[in-house]
Structure formats: C-alpha cells, structure tokens
Amino acid sequence: MTTVSFIMPVRNEEEYIRVSLQSLVDQSYPAGECEIIVVDGRSSDRTREIIEEIREKNPQVLCLDNPAGIVPTAMNIGIRAARGEVIIRADGHNIYPADYTANCVKCLLKTGADNVGGPWLTVPADRSFGATLVAAILSSPFGVGNSKFRTSREEGFVDTVPFGAFRKAIFDRVGMYNEQLVRNQDNELNARIRSAGGKIYLTPALTTRHCPVKTFPAFLKYAFKTSRWHFFTLRENRRSMSLRHLAPAMFLMFLVVLLLASFASGIALVLLSAVIGTYLAIGFCFSLGKKAEDHRVALAQPFASLLFHVVYGAGTLLGFIYIFRRPSNKPIRPGLSILEKEK
C-alpha cells in the first residue's frame, strides 16, 4: 500500500487546530501507512499544547519545530523527515473528509499527475456577520475571479491547486519549497512542476472545508499582506502568477487615473461614477442572484468586494518595490522568536 505523509505547517492556530488535526487522525486510510507531521512555527498560544494532547493518543502524529516560523521552511522540514511516498500539504484551517487520503492516492495513480488537489468549500468561521461576509466574498466569482479551486466544481488538469498531494519524487526533480516566499510558495512550486513537464490535477473528489478569518478587517489585512508578495514572486518565477492576481491592481490604477482626471474634466467624473456604478450593479447581480441566508451580507457584499479589490490592488502596487529588493521573511502570524523561546 502507498505510504502517505501529511505535513501541516502551523503557527498560533489554537482556534482551528483541534478540529483540523482530528479530521486527519480520523482518516479511513490505515494509520500504519499514514503519518501526520505537524511543523509548529513556535506558537505562543495553546497550539502546541493541543497538538500534544492529540499526539498522546495517536502515535502517527509527530510534531517538529520550525524556528523560522514561515510555511515554506515548515514544508521543507516536513518533507525531509517524511517517510511517505506521497506528500500531502495540510492546512490548519481546513477540515478533511474521512476518505481524503484514499482519494488523493487514487487520483495520483489514476491521472498520472504529480500534484492533485480539490476545491475549497469556504465556510464561515462562526455565525457572525463578518465571518459570513468574508466567506461570501471568497466563494463568489465576482470576489475571486477565475480561481477555480474556490468557485468551480470542474475536474481536469489545471495550473495550480491549493496545497495538494504530491508524489514525493517530484521534489527531487524540481526542488523544494522556495524559502524566500513567505506567501505564494504553492503557486511558485506548481509553476516549476509545470516547467519540468509535470501535471497538476483538480478534482471535486478532494473537496475540503476551509474556514477563513473571522472578521472583515482581518480579511483586508490578510489580502494586503498577501498581494504585496506578487511582484517578488514574479521576480522569482515569472510563470507563478496569472493575470487574475494582477487584475485588482490594474483596476485600482484605472480608478485613480479617472479620479485625478475628474478634478479637471467633468467627463472623467461621469466616467468614474459610471465605472463604480457598473461595478456595484454587477456585484449585486452576483450577491442577490443566489439564495442568501443573511440578506445583510448580500447587500453589503458588493461594497465589501470593492474595498477588498482596492486593498488587494494597493498591496500589489506597493509590492512593486520588491522587484528591486527582497521583502522581509517574517512569519505571517505573531509568535515567539528563537531567542524568546530559548529563555
């Protein structure tokens, strides 16, 4: 039987880690053929404690230390320690169905792909207005464009998948995760797989539930920080980003040009108003066109999407400076530094 190694990078995930990790422990795949390597980036909350509680009852769970605190380093630590023939990148915000491991192995064998993954069913982290609004934006084509793993149930070969299940041998061919990339490391790795002639496959059989951040301000902060890495990612590998990633920046530049021109031209002001009005009208078509449990979310979604796209575009444009220099590789979430940990 094919041996499998899950690798889960975490840092300060006490709100989500128990449910996510337990869903991996509860896989139908034989526990003796499946190890779960949690690589902790020196969390300062109860993440490590919760991991240890689960590990005590489940010997297939291992916990390794990640002094750097960033995802690509965690993945490389896990890959080097893994004994599985298949490497599955797991996420502390995802909940996995019991047959996920078996389906990953089956799909790799059936398709001949080097990396397989499935759509995310984005669900609110709780029942609050903010959490529901964030999930609605991330589930809508109006919010995330042609991001197939978020909005589509189609099956077939694609450019990238979220995280994924890899044949371990692919890392010998294309190299490990790029530790310069705090963000976008999956896109860059998948670009190298494609360049080496490898194939990436998306299938609804590997659908997982994903819980994003709980509040809209936290969502905007995440979007801004992520988009600032786009130009540096392009510098590292020009095939790793698509037009979708740059579209909000182009949209924002168009709005700024019209805004500046409107101070001197009434036509520019009318055009600016028309563009924003059309944007919101299309947004309402998407948000009101499907059944919504919370009508407040449907009414707020077009305006929230506009703010999301503006913030995302601003982050992308400000990140242009990283064409010329490397950004800081500080961890995404706060936690203990190496020195603090050793005291």
Image (spheres, grey):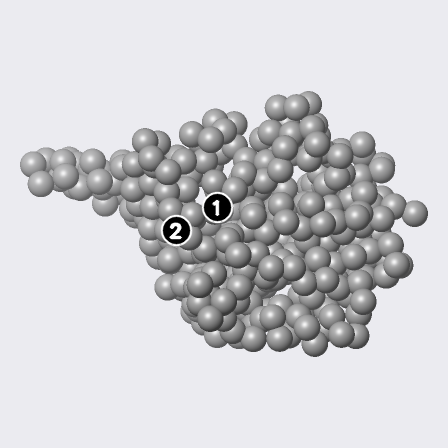
Q: Is residue 342 left or right of residue 115?
A: left
**Which residue is depicted at the point 52% across and 32% down?**
240
Q: Which residue is mark 2?
A: 225
Q: Quadrant of residue 185?
A: top right
The one nearer the camera, 81 or 286, is 81
Q: Is residue 295 left or right of residue 119?
A: left
Secondary structure under badge 1?
loop
Q: Is residue 1 left or right of residue 296?
A: right
Q: Alpha carbon of mark 2 to alpha carbon of mark 1: how far?
A: 9 Å
- x and y percent of residue 95 in the render? 68, 63
Marks 2 and 1 close (CB-CB < 8 Å): yes
- x and y percent of residue 313 in the render? 34, 43
- x and y percent of residue 224 in the render? 37, 51
**Which residue is depicted at the point 47% across and 40% down?**
180
Few, some or many C-alpha atoms within 10 Å of disc 2 (few <14, some 14-19, many ≥20)?
some
Location of residue 39 with respect to 124 vertically, above or below: above
Q: Is residue 187 visible?
A: no
Location of residue 338 with respect to 230 vertically, above or below: below
Q: Is residue 271 visible?
A: yes
Identity, as a three-letter code, of the amino acid under mark 1: Arg
Q: Which residue is mark 1?
A: 183
